[in-house]
Amino acid sequence: MDSEIRESRTLTVVALACALVIGLPFLNKPIHIDDTFVLAVSEQIRRDPLRPFGSYRPEDAKQREEMLKRGEPLSPSWAPLDWFHDPDPIFDITTNPPFLSYWLAPVLAAFGPSEIALHLAMLPFLILLALAAASLSKRFAQGSVWPVLFVLFSPAVVVSPNLMRDVPAAALATAAVALFIAGTDRDQWLYAIVGAALAGLAMVTKYSALIVLPVLALYPLLRGKPRFLAALLPAAAILGLWYLQNYLVNGQIHFFVMRSKEKASIDKVNMATAGLVITGASFLLAPGLLAHAIRRRDWLSPLGAVVVAAATLLFLRRHYPGQCSFQYYLWAILGAVLIYWVVVAGLFAGGRWWKRPVEPAALDSLFLLVWLIGPYLCGVLFVEFPAVRHILPAAAPIALIAARYAQRTIAPPSRWVAGAFGIGLAAQAILAFWTAAADYQYADTYRRFAREDFKKMGISTAGQIWFNGHWGWKHYALEAGFRHVTEHGPDFPKPGDLMIVPDICHRGNLPPGLQERLEQIAEKRYPARLDLVTMDWVRASFYATFGTTTPAYFIQGADYEVFRVFRVK
């Protein structure tokens, strides 16, 4: 018993250390991608805490259209934000609920937009994810350290702790599963209720966390304890309160408004293929799984993996005839093999769950498999575009199923298998931190240009400095005093003004006729010093993996970003 307690404490310490190793080096990471949107909602909460998305209602739609046509500014009570081409009510353009913005609002009020203060406020979510992974490993994987390490040192986790909603939602949902399971197993209602409350907070952090509710409901049913379904009431109550706020303030439920407008940018086949690429680039578990299969002479699993790899390659060659990138093929094939392996392990490695009597280990594997499938279905069917961060809710079940497969029928434990897992983990961690460092440098191009490098260019102007683009660039450009150009005004650049346009950053439409009046006078390039890019829309797209892009792409001679400065004629 003492040794079990020591091992449990050691695993907890390892999990905490991993969270700090991931979070602390990137505390000064610039505001990046959707961070600016999250902070805009936090600012709105500071102005009106009970109306995080403003007071925009359906009957205001006609007035809004007329105001946009006339080039009039929208009502401040609608909390307008320009995130595409023109200012729109936040209620109408945000795709997620505001819990994270509530979490960050006090930090923003106390310290302003301090990158270090804001990222310190995000660190508890990383710690929560680490502790939840450790708890689940004790429950499902005999306290193995591998699930904790493979979850935390995934590029999906190491690169993603910006000020975005994905890591907090995944951490809250994973902790909810861990606590709810502990409460159900031990007949302790407090644990189950707290777990359900965390699930409710996850759902009002990111709507995709709604999948955790049926996952939690499944567990007591599998365990023959349906009475614990009553413990889910706090989760439903938290979500219900958010819906009630929507109806009372905005006259409609935000989730249903968002679902009616959010359409997938690519077809389902491309969404699924992107899921394979993201999975393969996020979890390098294959060496350990292969080593274990060879060790126990499980020849069917590697043979199936070879068949899956060959079929995936043929499919990619047929479906994407112009794609010839080795990196793309590698991640897609590794992803297909990993998904095949964990699905087979979830179905068969735990025992015969389809026959009676059912072994508890078989029910555990079945539960983990259902938990894994849920986020994947959401990622293919219910999101506008695939992205690495969308795989975070599936990270824990992937690693747990793999660990359970590797623990089968080996006595004594094989150092060779552990070494293979270690090789995979080392490669995954190197990839994760390399990608995170490159993404930091890419994000820093916007901060450096707005704060320092534009002034160093010595471009004189007697007029206004305008800019186009969003993400973190918008945050720093506004901080520098530049004006954001909008498609329909009300104000437009005048002759003699300057216009700054980045190449990579998402940009809105320019006012009609402005493009023809722009004369480029300077440009500033930021070379990719680490020979890896995370966003260029052609090869790499970490935050929105479209078509045949990969989350990160190793390449020499590329640029993180190029800023072009124009004078208005």
Image: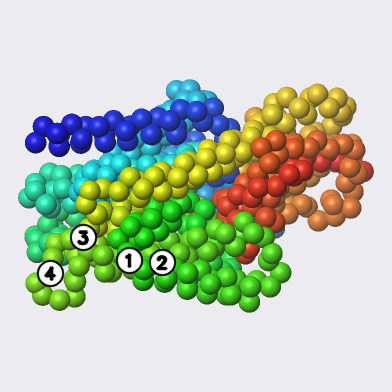
Q: Is residue 331 left or right of residue 179?
A: right
Residue 515 percent coordinates (x, y)? 85, 52
475 and 536: which one is in front?
536
Within-10-Å neighbours for mark 4: few <14, some 14–19, many 20+:
few
Cα separation, mark 1 vs mark 3, equals: 21 Å
Q: Name the residue carrying label 2.
A: 302
Where residue 383 is drawn, which disc sits there?
none
Residue 8 in the image, given as x and y percentages of width and height: 20, 36
Q: Are marks 1 and 2 in contact (CB under 8 Å)?
A: yes
Structural distance between the alpha carbons of marks 4 and 2:
27 Å
What residue sits right under mark 3 in the picture?
Answer: 364
Q: Disc 4 designates what residue?
A: 358
Q: Mark 1 or 3 closer to N-term? A: 1
Instruction: Report how far apart the C-alphas of labels 1 and 4 lie in the structure.
Output: 23 Å
Secondary element under disc 4, as helix, strand or loop, is loop
Disc nearer the start of the sequence (2/3): 2
In primary-sequence order, the first of circles 4 and 2 is: 2
Q: Amino acid at mark 2?
A: Pro
Helix, strand or loop for disc 1: loop
Measuring 68% from the left and 41% from the top, which residue is drawn there?
531
